[in-house]
């Protein structure tokens, strides 16, 4: 197979936020997975386990979404601020978590974690059991610079400066756990919540940095997701628009049709089904992007020069990942192992997001630790780094680069490619989604190149996974490139079921 990499054919800039992460009070994602508390025997820094912290610093996710998910619609921020021994104790039923919720990891712990690992926070507001005053106070506590009771309270809790958190989700999956709403009923609530958001500006003419994210459709429902977005825009267009910057669709790659299929035990059909399922995201992004464009056209021209018109909304994929059937019965809740099947769909998903960087601005993997498509699994004091972590690390080089328009391969080949350019460097990732066949790819660059590195991630057997006893069974490795050609043509061998990233310098 020969593939032309034309560095002059570009799509757009890859927003680093397409590599976002999501953590929730669900199972052992936050409690046990991140937070162990200062008194724990597990080595920690201010309550955050050191092993996971080191890894999150290495990953440096551009965005971290919190506190949910569905949990966000039960969350009252006041339960999680102030002295830890005085915090509220409640019960967490989220997706079968079924544990006491002692709110030790609250707003300050989350925002300090973001500061430490270099992530921008995206906070999801409780629109179901919470109210507008509560939302407004939360924003004031976090962001107010001026002398107020709430800014003093934040300072009293140890953070002098405002956190300047600008990304706020209003509602989560409001078509299901977030209220079983219709677009019209959601829009009624959304208008009120979004209009009440403080602006944190210094003059009435200054544009607010606050970024309001509306709950978008369940992309797994092909009929409902189209109708949802159409009706959402109808409800939005008729009268003046509240602040709205982002529209958050969720897509899970459900693997539930064969109940014998587990994360580590699957047939070739199961392999194919999951790979093909992940590929569906691209069409869904295109459909939603067009629906947003059409929806914006419904909005009337302003009647006076005092009025503004909403003319753009960013498409976001706030939750994505593989969801295998066995996760429903897992304890801790929704915990699943990760093999090359998941690593390949993670790579395919990142490629889809990057290739559509002119349509999608932000996306979050669900979830970072111990839940669904994890990068990290923990068992008491032990930590396992999954192959998904390797994929995110290998793909980091794409962040902020310019996506190149690489010709699409015949899907029957099982090989998928994506390339981006940053300065005089080109990164090509190559996914061999074939279960057992090694493939060879001839890359033809439009200019002369010299190879800087080749990283590969493959397993001896596609069912292999990393465990406490064998933590590096599936780990990325550097390929020796000393014998590689020094001209425009590069011949790369892709092991079966593998992800590779090639970095070249343009001469
Ligand atoms: O990621 C797990 C759950 O999936 C989230 O809480 C919810 O938003 C979605 O249904």
Image: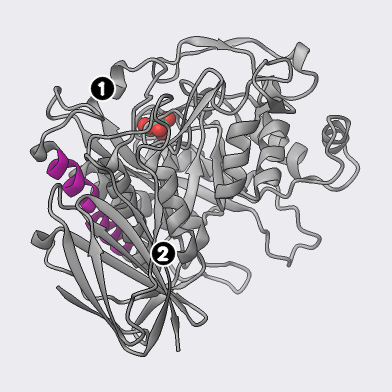
Q: Which quarter of the rendering shows the C terminus?
A: bottom left
**Of residues 187 and 223, which is closer to you in this image?**
223
Residue 358 shown left or right of residue 304 in the figure: left
Are there few (<14), some (14-19), or many (20+) residues within 10 Å of tag 2? some
User: What residue sits 73% from the left and 33% below the top?
Assistant: 108
Mark whose residue sits in front, 2 or 1: 1
Percent coordinates x, y for residue 208 in the rendering:
68, 59
User: What residue sits 27% from the left and 75% below the top?
Assistant: 406
Q: Which quarter of the rendering shows the N terminus?
A: bottom left
**Of residues 423 and 161, which is closer to you in this image?**
423
User: Can the viewer see residue 56 in this picture?
Assistant: yes
**Of residues 126 and 235, which is closer to you in this image?**
126
Please name the residue that numbered disc 1 is placed on: 326
Q: Quadrant of ligand 1?
A: top left
Q: Which residues are magenta?
A: 271-291
Secondary structure at numbered mark 2: loop
Question: Which callout, 2 or 1, points at the residue further toward the start of the chain?
Answer: 2
- The answer to which image quadrant residue 153 occupies is top right
Q: CA distance from mark 2 to mark 1?
A: 45 Å
Please name the residue that numbered disc 2 is placed on: 299
Secondary structure at numbered mark 1: helix
User: Can the viewer see residue 298 in this picture?
Assistant: no
Residue 289 shown in magenta: yes
Percent coordinates x, y for residue 289 in the rendering:
33, 61
Are there few (<14), some (14-19), or many (20+) residues within 10 Å of tag 1? some
Percent coordinates x, y for residue 461 in the rendering:
22, 39
Secondary structure predominantly adopted by residues drawn in magenta = helix
User: What residue sits 88% from the left and 35% below the top?
Assistant: 152
């Amino acid at each position: 197979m020969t593939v032309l990499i034309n560095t002059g054919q570009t799509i757009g800039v890859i927003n680093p936020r397409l590599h976002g992460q999501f953590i929730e009070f669900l199972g052992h994602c936050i409690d046990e997975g991140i937070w162990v508390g200062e008194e724990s025997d597990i080595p920690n820094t201010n309550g955050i386990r050191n092993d996971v912290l080191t890894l999150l610093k290495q990953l440096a996710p551009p965005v971290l979404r919190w506190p949910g998910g569905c949990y966000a619609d039960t969350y009252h921020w006041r339960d999680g601020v102030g002295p830890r021994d005085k915090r509220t104790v409640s019960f967490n039923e989220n997706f079968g978590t079924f544990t006491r919720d002692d709110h030790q990891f609250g707003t300050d712990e989350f925002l300090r974690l973001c500061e430490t690992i270099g992530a921008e926070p995206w906070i999801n507001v409780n629109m179901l059991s919470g109210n507008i005053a509560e939302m407004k106070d939360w924003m004031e506590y976090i962001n107010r610079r001026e002398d107020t009771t709430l800014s003093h309270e934040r300072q009293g809790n140890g953070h002098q400066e405002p956190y300047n958190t600008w990304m706020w989700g209003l509602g989560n999956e409001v078509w299901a756990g977030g209220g079983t709403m219709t677009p019209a009923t959601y829009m009624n609530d959304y208008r009120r919540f979004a209009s009440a958001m403080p602006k944190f500006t210094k003059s009435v003419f200054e544009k607010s940095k606050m970024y309001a994210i509306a709950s978008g459709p369940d992309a797994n429902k092909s009929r409902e997701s189209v109708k949802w977005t159409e009706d959402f825009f109808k409800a939005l267009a008729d009268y003046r628009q509240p602040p709205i910057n982002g529209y958050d669709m969720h897509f899970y790659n459900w693997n539930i049709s064969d109940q014998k299929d587990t994360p580590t035990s699957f047939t070739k059909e199961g392999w194919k089904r999951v790979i093909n399922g992940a590929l569906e995201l691209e069409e869904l992004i295109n459909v939603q992007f067009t629906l947003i464009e059409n929806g914006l056209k419904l909005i009337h021209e302003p009647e006076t020069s005092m009025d503004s018109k909403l003319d753009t909304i960013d498409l976001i994929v706030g939750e994505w990942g593989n969801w295998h059937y066995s996760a429903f019965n897992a304890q801790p809740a929704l915990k699943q192992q990760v093999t090359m099947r998941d690593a390949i769909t993670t790579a395919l998903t990142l490629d889809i997001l990057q290739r559509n960087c002119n349509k999608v601005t932000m996306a979050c993997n669900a979830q970072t630790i111990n839940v669904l498509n994890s990068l990290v699994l923990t068992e008491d004091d032990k930590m396992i780094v999954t192959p998904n972590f390797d994929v995110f690390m290998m793909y980091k080089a794409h962040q902020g680069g310019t996506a190149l328009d690489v010709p699409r391969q015949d899907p029957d080949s099982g090989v998928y490619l994506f390339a981006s350019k940053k300065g005089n460097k080109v990164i090509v990732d190559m996914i061999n989604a074939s279960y057992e066949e090694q493939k060879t790819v001839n890359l033809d660059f439009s200019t002369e190149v010299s190879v800087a590195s080749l990283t590969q991630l493959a397993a001896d057997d596609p069912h292999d996974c990393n465990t406490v006893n064998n933590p590096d069974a599936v780990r990325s490795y550097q390929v020796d490139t000393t014998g590689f050609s020094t001209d425009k043509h590069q011949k790369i061998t892709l092991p079966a079921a593998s992800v590779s990233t090639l970095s070249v310098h343009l001469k």
